[in-house]
Image: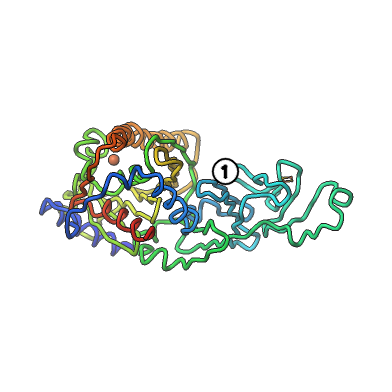
C-alpha cells in the first residue's frame, strides 16, 4: 500500500469506529463440526491445499543473496528454494538422487561456499541449478551412470511483489497473479524485498490447522480474549475487510486512531494507527504492524495437530546487541500472546469439537474472514 491507500484506510477505519461497526458478510454461516474433525476430509485437504496448491514461502528478503536457501518439509514434499547466481530463484524437491537424503535441514542458510549443496549422507554434490556435479568414488562406484539425468527434481517457483511462492507437486503449474488475485495492492509497498529477517519460532499445537487459522481472521475476540494485550491496543470488532480471490485483508484501528482528527492530514503517520492481517490462502497470514511485518505459516500434521512458523522481519539489521535484544524480546512477547491466549483457548475449543456431539459452528456476519477461509476450502475440495 502506498501513502494514499494508507490514508484512505485510516479514513475508512475512523468511519467504522465512529459507527461502532465492522465490514459485514451477507449472512450468518454455519459449519458442520465434522469439517474440523473428519479424517477423510483432512486427507483431502492435505493433498488439495498443500501438496497440489501453490504455497507462500516467504518474502523475498528471506533469501536475499545468491546462495541463500530456505528448506521446509510441511506439505508432503520436501522443498528446497535457493537464490541462483543471477539473482533468480530455483526450487527443488529436497531429496538426493542417490538414496534420498535431504540435502539440507529445514531452515534458512547459505549454500556451501555460496555455490553448492553437498548431501550429508555420502557427499554427492549439486550446484545452485540442481545439477549433479560431484560423486565421491564415482568412477569406480558408479561407472556409466548418466549424471545429467540425476539432477535435483525441479519445482515451479515464482517471485513477484516481494513474495515467493512454490508449487510442491512437480507435475503441476500455477500463475502467480491468479494466486494473488489483487492482494498485492494491500501487501506491496511494505519493503518485503529489503527488510531484515530476524528469525522464526516454531510452535506445535494439539488442534486442527483450521482452528489455528480461524484465530487470525476476526478481531471480534480482542476485547474478551485479549483484554490486557491486543485488546488494550486495537479496537475490538472493527475491521476493514477486503477480499481478493481466495485471499483477504483485514485492516485494524489502534485505540488512538481518533487522535488523528487533531492532526493535519499531510502530517499523518498512518502505519502508527493501523495494522493489517493479510491472508494468503490457504495457510499464511502476513501481519503488517508499525514499522515491521511478521508471517505466520500454519501446516496440518493430523486432524488433531498442526505446526505454525512465526517469522519476524524488521526494517534494518539491528545496529547493536541491545537493539537486537529489544527486537528479540518484542518477537517473543508477540509469540507468547498467541500461544498463551489464543492457542490456550483454542486447545479447549478443540476438545469441545472432539466431543462427538453433532452440532454446528456459527460464524457471524462480523466474521467475514473466517467465512471466507471455510468457503474457499470447500470450493477447492469440491
Ligand atoms: S543419499 Fe545423498 S549422497 Fe547418498
Ligand atoms: Fe487473538
Observer-nearest residue: 54 or 49? 49
**Render colour scheme:** rainbow
Name the secondary structure under disc 1. loop
Q: What residue is shown at x 22% (from left), y 51% (from top)?
A: 30
> Is there any visible trace of residue 169 in the rendered image?
yes
User: Residue 19: horizontal and vertical position, in percent?
Assistant: 10, 54
Seen at 36% across and 66% down, the residue is: 182
Q: Residue at x 16, y 50 (%)?
A: 258
* Residue 3, image quadrant: bottom left
Q: Position of residue 259 (x, y in %)?
A: 17, 49
Which quarter of the image is occupied by the N terminus? bottom left
Task: Please say if 202 is above or below 176.
Answer: above
Taking depth in this image into account, of 279 and 7 the one nearest to the observer is 279
Residue extending furthest toward the left: 19
Q: For mark 1, does the 10 Å Cα neighbourhood hold few (<14), some (14 to 19), or many (20 or more) residues?
A: some
- Picture coordinates of residue 265 (x, y %)? 21, 59
Q: Residue at x 57, y 45 (%)?
A: 108
Ligand 1, seen in the image, is in the quarter at top right
The answer to whether 379 appears left or right of 191 in the picture is: left
Residue occupied by mark 1: 106
Q: How many numbered discs, if any?
A: 1
Residue farthest toward the right in the current orientation of the protein: 140
Residue 10 image position (x, y, % from top left): 22, 57
Look at the numbered disc 1 and say if its residue's Cβ is closer than 8 Å to ligand 1.
no
Please name whichever residue, 60 or 21, is drawn nearer the observer in this view of the structure. Answer: 21
Residue 345: in sight, yes or no?
no
Quadrant containing the C terminus is: bottom left
Q: Is residue 153 left or right of residue 296?
A: right
Amino acid at each position: 500500500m502506498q501513502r494514499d491507500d494508507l490514508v484512505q484506510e485510516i479514513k475508512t477505519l475512523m468511519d467504522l469506529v465512529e459507527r461502532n461497526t465492522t465490514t459485514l458478510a451477507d449472512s450468518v454461516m454455519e459449519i458442520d463440526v465434522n469439517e474440523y474433525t473428519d479424517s477423510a476430509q483432512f486427507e483431502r485437504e492435505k493433498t488439495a491445499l498443500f501438496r497440489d496448491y501453490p504455497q507462500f514461502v516467504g518474502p523475498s528478503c528471506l533469501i536475499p543473496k545468491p546462495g541463500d536457501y530456505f528448506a521446509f518439509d510441511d506439505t508432503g514434499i520436501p522443498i528446497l528454494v535457493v537464490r541462483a547466481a543471477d539473482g533468480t530463484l530455483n526450487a527443488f524437491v529436497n531429496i538426493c538422487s542417490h538414496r534420498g537424503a535431504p540435502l539440507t535441514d529445514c531452515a534458512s542458510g547459505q549454500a556451501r561456499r555460496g555455490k553448492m549443496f553437498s548431501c550429508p549422507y555420502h557427499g554427492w554434490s549439486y550446484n545452485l541449478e540442481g545439477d549433479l556435479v560431484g560423486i565421491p568414488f564415482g568412477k569406480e562406484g558408479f561407472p556409466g551412470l548418466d549424471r545429467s539425468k540425476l539432477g535435483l527434481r525441479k519445482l515451479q517457483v515464482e517471485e513477484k511483489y516481494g513474495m515467493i511462492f512454490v508449487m510442491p507437486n512437480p507435475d503441476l503449474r500455477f500463475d502467480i497473479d491468479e494466486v494473488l488475485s489483487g492482494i498485492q495492492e494491500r501487501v506491496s509497498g511494505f519493503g518485503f524485498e529489503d527488510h531484515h529477517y530476524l528469525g522464526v519460532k516454531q510452535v506445535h499445537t494439539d488442534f486442527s490447522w483450521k482452528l489455528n487459522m480461524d484465530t487470525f481472521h476476526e478481531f471480534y475476540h480482542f476485547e474478551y480474549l485479549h483484554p490486557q494485550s491486543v485488546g488494550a491496543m486495537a479496537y475490538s470488532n472493527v475491521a476493514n475487510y477486503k477480499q481478493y480471490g481466495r485471499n483477504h485483508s483485514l485492516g485494524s484501528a489502534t485505540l488512538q486512531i481518533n487522535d488523528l482528527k487533531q492532526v493535519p492530514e499531510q502530517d499523518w503517520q498512518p502505519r502508527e494507527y493501523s495494522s493489517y492481517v493479510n491472508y494468503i490462502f490457504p495457510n499464511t497470514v502476513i501481519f503488517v504492524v508499525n514499522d515491521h511485518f511478521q508471517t505466520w505459516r500454519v501446516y496440518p500434521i493430523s486432524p488433531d495437530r498442526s505446526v505454525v512458523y512465526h517469522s519476524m522481519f524488521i526494517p534494518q539489521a539491528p545496529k547493536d546487541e541491545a537493539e537486537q535484544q529489544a527486537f528479540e524480546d518484542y518477537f517473543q512477547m508477540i509469540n507468547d500472546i498467541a500461544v498463551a491466549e489464543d492457542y490456550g483457548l483454542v486447545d479447549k475449543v478443540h476438545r469441545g469439537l472432539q466431543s462427538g456431539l453433532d452440532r454446528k459452528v456459527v460464524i457471524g456476519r462480523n466474521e467475514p474472514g473466517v467465512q471466507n477461509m471455510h468457503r474457499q476450502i470447500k470450493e477447492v475440495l469440491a
